Image (cartoon, rainbow, N blue to C red):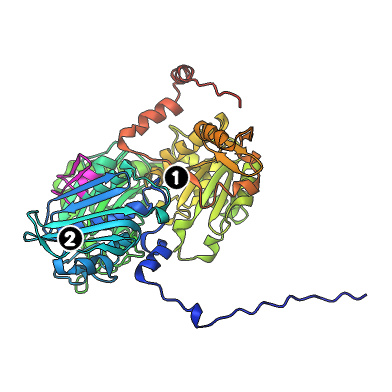
Amino acid sequence: MEEKEIKSIPTEVVYADDNIKTLEWWEHIRHRPGMYIGKLGDGCYADDGIYVLLKEVLDNAMDEYMMGYGKVVEIKINDKHVSVRDFGRGIPLGKVVDASSKMNTGGKYDSKAFKKSVGLNGVGIKAVNALSSYMRVESYRESEVKAVQYAQAQITENPPIEKCDKANGTLVEFIPDIEVFKEYAYKDEYVEALLKNYVFLNSGLVINYNGKRFFSKNGLQDLLNENMTAESRYPIIHLQGEDIELALTHANQYGEEYYSFVNGQHTAQGGTHLSTFREAISRVIKEYFNKNFEFADIRSGLTAAISIKVEEPIFESQTKTKLGSKEMGPKGPTVAKFIGDFVKKELDNFLHKNPHIAESLLKKILESEKERKAIAGVTKLARDRAKKANLHNKKLRDCRLHYNDTKGENLDQSCVFITEGDSASGSITQSRDPNYQAVFSLRGKPLNTFGLTKKIVYENEEFNLLQAALNIEDGLESLRYNKVIISTDADVDGMHIRLLIITFFLQFFPDLIKNNHVFILQTPLFRVRNKKETIYCYSEEERINAIEKLKPNPEITRFKGLGEISPSEFKNFIGKDIRLDPVTMKKQDAVKEMLEFYMGKNTMDRQNFIIDNLVVEEEI
């Protein structure tokens, strides 16, 4: 009997009037929160949504301060309840409801009331309202108060204007909705880092947070002193003008390190102001010394911060992490001209007035130039080798993002897993989302780079190819992945490899860590299951709780290597519920001393430390 092709008949899809739906403003925010606050998260990372909600409220208080009203902001966070009280002008009482619950409503469309504001599109506090299970706004003006209370953007209390004896300003209280954010918690370290930036950018402002006082007298100079982890080669150069402030110095480290801000907003991804600033510094220093220096030599080890104020800034997303504006305002100069003219005049004047600092700066540039020339031959060969290898790089299994998204608009979703061994990289490769997740496979343990010069980056094939895969040779501006995830086994060898990779980054690319791009992948230590349910446990405590929940006698599996986890299971650990530990770097961490102790040549001291702190793991 002759076989005939059997074609399925598609079911008719009805497309009628009922299929067309209009969402209320608050429904749209709750349905598509990523459009308004970026990712949701659970509070474990600084860019999680609950911190964006806090920032949206704080931005309004900062705008008041920048306009000259209210020198103190009171913040309290008790578990999930957030309270922000400023002492600005207060929202006009007749518009409290509109300002907190009507989209595209706010005072910042009127440039006379708010000349250089962060929040310009009338969305911020409305997003807080829509994504909170409870929000209350109270505005105090001239001995009167107007209050309104919400639950998921629906008014629950709306009393009339009343008399009061409180100082002018605004109180906003909210609780991020657990229906949207699930389980979450605010972490003091991220809240405090946010508040420090606010006071660094607003000298004289006082922020009180849960009993702690935050204040800065010297602005961006204080910011650099707070964040620098390497020794400065000369005193910080601190320059201020109308609508611009900058601070810079060179440190004993590789790479470049920048902190950029627009209207008080930390532009973590830079933008037009940062690229202009980098070029302007290089050009002015080159012209001052009248030497044909390479810009890379001038900027090697540079640590700098810039803050500008722009009328009607254009950001490339609602979360405002990258400036897209080309002009300072409708009638002002371009960003490039404004920054370029200021740097040319003020930095050149400073260097002429401070020849001892200019001399230290020159010495640092000459050292960088000497090292670059010493490895020039190795560098060229290594670059050529890396470019050729990248064409058929078996170490790198790239993601489709870099082939389909030429503008890099979805870069924040991308990541690369750095792993070791064929079995581990094979499991991750088969489990990953190939659209946004790449895999870089190491061969055995990498070299301990502590105390070595950058020449080793080019001479060592593993590090040369890793540098090329990340595209970080000339800084982070062309970084190909937002998250660099170290993915090693949880045993002693895996921990050692993890330390060696982190040492490599700390030595040669510290800005990669300081800009929150490096993470450690958490994978479960145990799997506890019965016929009905499977629980993955990341700690001994979770294992005990799982056994109690699944009693009697569940099956317990101890995972000792990434390669032991099947690809079908691995999908559970690198998908939407991925657990990542950020690798952080702070001044108080004493990074140089730690590297010297743990990765240096003091073998006996380290051996004694290990023996004194040895913990023997019990067999399960």
Give the residue furthest to the right. 1
Image quadrant for the C terminus? top right
Q: Seen in the image, is 528 located left or right of residue 19?
A: right
Nearest to the observer: residue 42 or residue 343: 42
Q: Residue tagged by mark 2?
A: 243
The amino acid on which the numbered mark 2 sits, given as a three-letter code, is Asp
The secondary element bearing badge 2 is classed as loop
Is there any visible trace of residue 266 in the rendered image? Answer: no
Write the start and end of the magenta stretch as one range.
Answer: 199-223
Image quadrant for the N terminus? bottom right
Q: Tell me where residue 339 appears, x and y as whole percent.
A: 23, 61
Q: Tell me where residue 329 appears, x and y as whole percent.
A: 22, 70
Q: In the displayed structure, would residue 277 be above or below residue 541? A: below
The amino acid on which the numbered mark 1 sits, given as a three-letter code, is Val
**Distance Cα–Cα, label 2 vs label 1:** 33 Å
Question: How many numbered circles are shown?
Answer: 2
Q: Tell me where residue 102 appears, x and y as whole percent.
A: 27, 70
Q: Seen in the image, is 180 located left or right of residue 51?
A: right
Crowd class of label 2 (few under 14; some 14 to 19; many from 20; radius 10 Å): some
The secondary element bearing badge 1 is classed as strand
Identified at 55% across, 40% down, the residue is 523
Nearest to the observer: residue 542 or residue 574: 542
Q: Is residue 294 magenta?
A: no
Identified at 32% across, 41% down, the residue is 189
Q: Tell me where residue 486 appears, x and y as whole percent.
A: 51, 42
Is there any visible trace of residue 605 in the rendered image? Answer: yes
Crowd class of label 1 (few under 14; some 14 to 19; many from 20; radius 10 Å): many
Q: Is residue 203 magenta?
A: yes
Q: Seen in the image, is 339 located left or right of residue 430?
A: left
Give the residue furthest to the bottom. 17
Hey, which quadrant is residue 164 in on the image? bottom left
Q: Residue tagged by mark 1?
A: 518
